[in-house]
Image (cartoon, grey):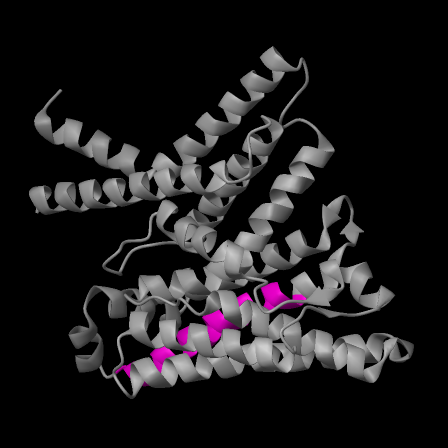
Amino acid sequence: MSEKNGTSILKSLLAAWSWLFLILILGFFEIYARVETGSTFLFHLYSIQSIAVAASQILLLALGLTLVIVAGHIDLSIAFSTGFAAVAMALVVRFIGADAGWLAVIIGLVVGLLAAVIVGLINGWLVAFINVPSFIGTLGTYGIARGAALIIAGGATVSIRSEEARSIGNGIVLGVPIPVLVAAVLAVICHYLLSYTKFGVHTYALGANRASVERAGVNVEKQLVALFVLSAITAGIGGLIYTMRFSAGAANAGEPILLYAVAAVFIGGASLTGGQGTVTGTVIGAFIIAVIQFGLVFSGLPPYWQFVAVGLVIIVAVVVDQSRDRLTGARS
């Protein structure tokens, strides 16, 4: 085998490593389950639903973030876009009252989503027009959104009584939980935007070479604002689902998932420097983390081991990304 062919094979393996890793961990936990307990890990409806719901929680924060990272930026405020939307919806539903039924839920959903959009607009304005680095700008709005959510919630979780909201957050359609269906629809929309539209082409180009995009006449400022608003919207929808699932809005609703959302994007093949990444890869990354979470619980290990495992996978993802870049540079 020539060196050129060997390099091509290695590059292909690096590109598909997330798929291979998902298959590997599924196989590992399935073998463990059959050997240790005589049962199955994956081939059970409860296991499939649990993994899918956990992956959907991560995806709702990671989908819009994928587009932002492909464009060469980062959005650290997604966790508290989630919390801000969750608290806003809960307060509206509580204020209107359970007697209003679906009307209270619909108004709560609209207000909660608008709350998230405000965060996205602020992020986009800071990055696009004030030229604040996205890491710093979204770190600032991270704190603002968190503080605002805690202030309007009075520093406490806002509980609600709404059977209509619970029927969405905990409902199942044809064996598929509604939160999973919502995440799947959003994933398809984001995939279409990134892969089949001019918006997606401009997003990739912006991450690869902003100067060339500006020379091509693309309104970069408008593109950046749209990306950060989209990131806030998907994260906000995660907050709305949280409120409907648990009948409560919490300012820290998305905080435990922030690390997992960022990890899912990079595990799925996005580059630290921008210009690379796919929604499909992010979906695989979310499922890898969800399988690790459920698998460790299934194995009886304490929950905090999840952070160790996910941290290790993030390091592997970064090493793979750097190796892929080096191979590409070598071939060039």
175 w.r.t. 261: above or below = above
Q: Residue 162 location in percent, x, y?
A: 84, 68
Tally of numbered tags: 0
69 w.r.t. 95: above or below = above
Q: Residue 61 location in percent, x, y?
A: 51, 61
Q: Nearer the viewer, residue 193 or 298?
A: 298
Q: Is any part of residue 329 visible from this angle?
A: yes
Q: Residue 17 location in percent, x, y?
A: 34, 35
Q: Looking at the image, which residue sits at the far bottom?
A: 129
Residue at x-position 38% and y-position 42%: 311
Q: Is residue 148 magenta?
A: no
Position of residue 120 in the picture relative to residue 157 (left or right): left
Characterize the magenta stretch by its predominant secondary structure: helix
Locate residue 278: give its quadrant. Answer: bottom left
79 w.r.t. 332: above or below = below
Give the residues in magenta: 218-240
Q: Residue 150 location in percent, x, y?
A: 58, 75
In which quadrant of the rendered image does the N terminus lie? top left
42 w.r.t. 190: above or below = above
Residue at x-position 41% and y-position 39%: 308
Q: Nearer the viewer, residue 21 or 292?
A: 292
